Image (cartoon, coloured by chain):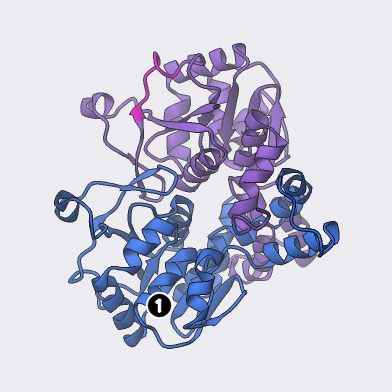
Chain colours: A blue, B purple
Amino acid sequence: MPSALILIADGTEEMEFTITYDTLVRAGIVCTSAYVPAQDAPEADKTALSFATCSRGLKIVPDTLFSPQAAVPEHYDLLVVPGGAKGAQTIAQSVPVQHLVRRYLQEEKYVGMICAGSLAAQTSKLPRQPLTSHPSVQAELEKDFEYSDAPVVVSGKLVTRCVRARGLRLLMSTARKLTPPTVPPPRDPAPLLRVLCTAVVQDWRTGTAFPFALTLVELLCGAAARAEVAGPMVFPAGTFA
Amino acid sequence: MPSALILIADGTEEMEFTITYDTLVRAGIVCTSAYVPAQDAPEADKTALSFATCSRGLKIVPDTLFSPQAAVPEHYDLLVVPGGAKGAQTIAQSVPVQHLVRRYLQEEKYVGMICAGSLAAQTSKLPRQPLTSHPSVQAELEKDFEYSDAPVVVSGKLVTRCVRARGLRLLMSTARKLTPPTVPPPRDPAPLLRVLCTAVVQDWRTGTAFPFALTLVELLCGAAARAEVAGPMVFPAGTFA
């Protein structure tokens, strides 16, 4: 059975973490979450397992404390770095994590990074390659990688995920139609946002971690497994049984 | 500032819980999660706050233990019952929860139920009204409610959410085209599922808790707030600033 190690820290985006964990478990992938304490965390947080306080205040109990000795690619098929600005920074700045990111790829194991989690590719000094991320870290990453606008980028064993893709392009083209290019963007964004809301919600899937998690399922378990996991999440289980 | 009480129990579906909590917090709604212990839980779980083990093993620390005295509609604008078969059953079978569901509606406060969470409408003996749910409890609920296939049903102050809607209809019509009605469904569902996978993923939004959470945001905070929350979740914050 394939296995995945999903890192978590204070400030991790709870939806990105939870959707990835839940979707991989549904695919039969054995998931372990490991807490990476911040460098300036109290000593107690580095030695005793408590919980991670996520970006919107949700508190998640990790399965284990991150241990460089236990997190090795001999034990897992996939290493995941979720987003959430503060959590991604903590994880990306961890020297043992950087070392493991390189080792997973050397051992031909998968490494997944969501949104701001892609920072770990840079701090791990991975070679220049295609990659995507949350727009907040795009400028930083463009210097060292072939930055892509695709929703999910698979570069060898490195899988990265942004949060905009089609949605942003749709928004920009609509905004351009609504606002002549010589006029500055509106000060109060609410009315324009309201106009675009329907389009946003219709395009919602590009804003979630689902396609990322399903891509990982497909890479680890094959296309049939992806379909089997995707099916019951929308359709009642047993429809085809 | 509007406030919401989101119930959680062992077996709650972690994505439904997390997406609702996270999305409401993004809208500025003060969220409190309260743990409802199972009737047969060890006494320690009923008096000391630990964590909820969700349907796929994720462990979430609730903000508080459920207390019938603290959970009253005088303190919150919205009560949410998430899905996940086992968790929904625990919550729906709690007599104090049933009492509160009725009191919230009497006081014209909102009550949201996701998927199997709609069972709480039945155990609370709510009057016959439009409602939807996870298909696994549809047969049970059809006896007592005007069962609907809409993705989100708003009936007065009761908001319910199913997980199929358009996706299921799409699947059934495609399946009908692929399989003559006199032929039994295929024994191995994988090939058919693979064919339908693209459609499923394109239709993914109907399978998530996002439209539910955004409907609650709109009801509590207005359409502008919904747009403001939906925007940055897909688009980079500050695009219009």
Q: Where is residue A179 shown, x and y percent of the image?
A: 82, 58
Identified at 25% across, 73% down, the residue is A95
| For residue B23, above or below residue A3 | above
From the viewer's side, name the closer residue of B16 and A162.
A162
Q: Amino acid at mark 1?
A: Gln
Subunit ID for the residue under disc 1: A
Q: Classify 10 Å Cα crowding around label 1: few (below 14), some (14-19), many (20 and above).
A: some
Q: Where is residue B121 shown, x and y percent of the image?
A: 58, 24
Identified at 45% across, 24% down, the residue is B93
Q: Magenta residues?
A: B64-71
| For residue A171, above or below residue B150 | below
Figure quadrant of the N terminus of chain B: top right
From the viewer's side, name the closer residue of B150 and B185.
B150
Q: Where is residue A98 shown, x and y percent of the image?
A: 30, 75
Residue underneath mark 1: A122
Q: Where is residue B226 shown, x and y percent of the image?
A: 66, 40
Magenta stretch encompasses residue B69? yes
Magenta stretch prevailing secondary structure: loop
Element at label 1: helix
Identified at 52% across, 45% down, the residue is B19
Identified at 76% across, 58% down, the residue is A184
Residue B181 visible, this angle: no
| For residue A10, above or below residue A2 | above
> How many numbered marks does the figure carry?
1
Residue A26 visible, this angle: yes
| For residue A168, above or below residue B232 | below
Please state if B207 lies on the left or on the right of A129 as rendered: right
Magenta stretch encompasses residue B222? no
* Among the 4 quarters of the image, the one containing residue B95: top left
